[in-house]
Amino acid sequence: MSKRIVINPLTRISGFMEIDVMVDQNRVVDVKTKGNLFRGFEQMLIGRSPFDAVYFTQRICGICSAAHSMASSLALEDALNIEPMEQGRYLRDIIHCCEFLQNHIRHFYQYTVPDFVKIEQNTLFQSDHNDFRLPKNINDRIAKHYFDSLTFSRLAHEMLAVLGGKAPHNHGVFIGGVTTQATAEKIVHIDSILTKIIRFIDDKMIPDVYDIANFYKDYFHLGGGYGNLLTYGAFNDYKELGTLYVDPLVFTKGTVEAFDENNIQEKIDYAYFKSVNNSNEPSEEVTEPDMDKENAYSWVKAPRYNGLPFEVGPLARLILSGAYENRISAMDRTIARALETKKIAEIMKILIQQVVPDVDVQKKYDLPESAAGRGLIDTTRGGLGHWLKIQDQKISFYQIITPSTWDFSTKDDNGYRGTAEEALMGTYIENPDNPAEIGRILRSFDPCMSCATHVYRPGKQVKTIKVF
């Protein structure tokens, strides 16, 4: 017997997402992931000073704002033909590391753990399902760490604010590096906090994720998807340090190849957009919104690489860097996030050791009359790309493809579903009235729908709604 399951909103994610699933004989036979949040950023930037983009695009998201400042700075550096000083890059990448740590700790404990661990301290944590399998001593230990993690997630943001001025929406990341010098006091301050966070990762986070995996082994066989992996590269290509994590690579059909940005296209066949073509290169055209479009079901477009959907994020990076065996599932994704937290902390330690205090890392930059650039970087959730054009010293074009657009895209004209949609296909739902499997698989991707839907519809009155 067929049953339609609609979850709106999917809770414990960043932003708002609806899931529309058809189940037949307890198996998922069709699925749509829908980004329903309507926003506007690319068009808002038209006509502004290019230097505004670094701070403006951070407002796309309060969760991964440093990521957008990084990608925007890289795009401007490409357009202005600027090569940042290595000391500036170290400081900027340390800020980026802080955001990785804050995001991963928060997502694992605050968003993922309640799927598997019964937290009973407050009625707010009551669950609709009863699939809790951990022995009481392990369950209670991880439940305590759920609350402990709040401190360490906050400490990661405190580190970011030491160099970035504040978090979220830092003022430090800018073209050329960062806006302020590092001092010996700042370096010591950050290093002392990082030592505490590393202890939490080693003593609690890593053992906790393996305990969960040990009692939910069936999730190693759920949520696989297509198996195509992509990274723009992370903490790579330093002049003296080389690559500390992973170079730009793609994996498909058992083969790892070098990433080529010319193979990226965005498709809009099932998204609320219209344009001359249903498929565009990122630097070609900003599509126009069309809420009445027939067959469209989401504001999230469909990025493709060589015509195929790809998964991005921690699991993709670990596999492509050779640090994780090639298994792709909901549980592997969750383990990868914890392992990457440790990896990022180790990279951050190395970068801190390279920092020279009181060294100027900024110059004065002049804007050209016209230019074009792109910034591609791997952030917490995966590959993030910003493309821009400058005309008459103003922004004339801006385009963004976020990690969650890769993972939560709509279908395309070739029939390929989005990566997360494909990950749900065929999943056995034990109780369709309380489909715990759907939330567990989708949250393993760490969706950030605030980033994925960044569009704007002109001509509509802005409304202010006060929430008490």
Image: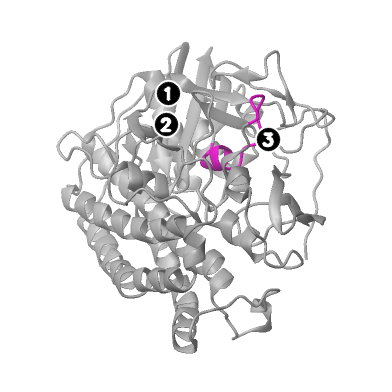
Mark-to-mark CA distance, 1 and 3: 25 Å
Task: Give the magenta part as a residue range.
Answer: 402-415
Image quadrant where one finds the N terminus: bottom right
Residue 398 vs 174, above or below: the answer is above
Please tell me whether mark 3 sits on a helix, a strand or a loop. loop
Residue 366: x and y in percent read 39, 19
Tell me the chief SS of the magenta region: loop
Q: Could you tell me which residue is drawn at 52 percent across and 32 percent down?
A: 52
Query: CB atoms at circles 1 and 2 under 8 Å apart?
Result: yes
Numbered badge on residue 141:
none
Query: Which residue was labeled with disc 2?
Result: 376
Q: Amino acid at mark 2?
A: Leu
Q: Secondary structure at mark 2?
A: strand
Which numbered disc covers residue 261?
Answer: 1
* Image quarter of residue 342: bottom left
The x, y position of residue 262, in whole percent, is 44, 19
Q: Earlier in the sequence, mark 2 or mark 3?
A: 3
Residue 374: within the magenta?
no
First in residue order: circle 1 vs circle 3? 3
Q: Amino acid at mark 1?
A: Glu
How far is disc 2 from disc 3 in space, using C-alphas? 21 Å
- Going by the numbered disc 3, the residue's amino acid type is Gly
Left or right placement of residue 230 versus residue 426 in this view: left
**Residue 40, label in figure:** 3
Between marks 2 and 3 in the image, the one whose residue lies nearer the viewer? 2
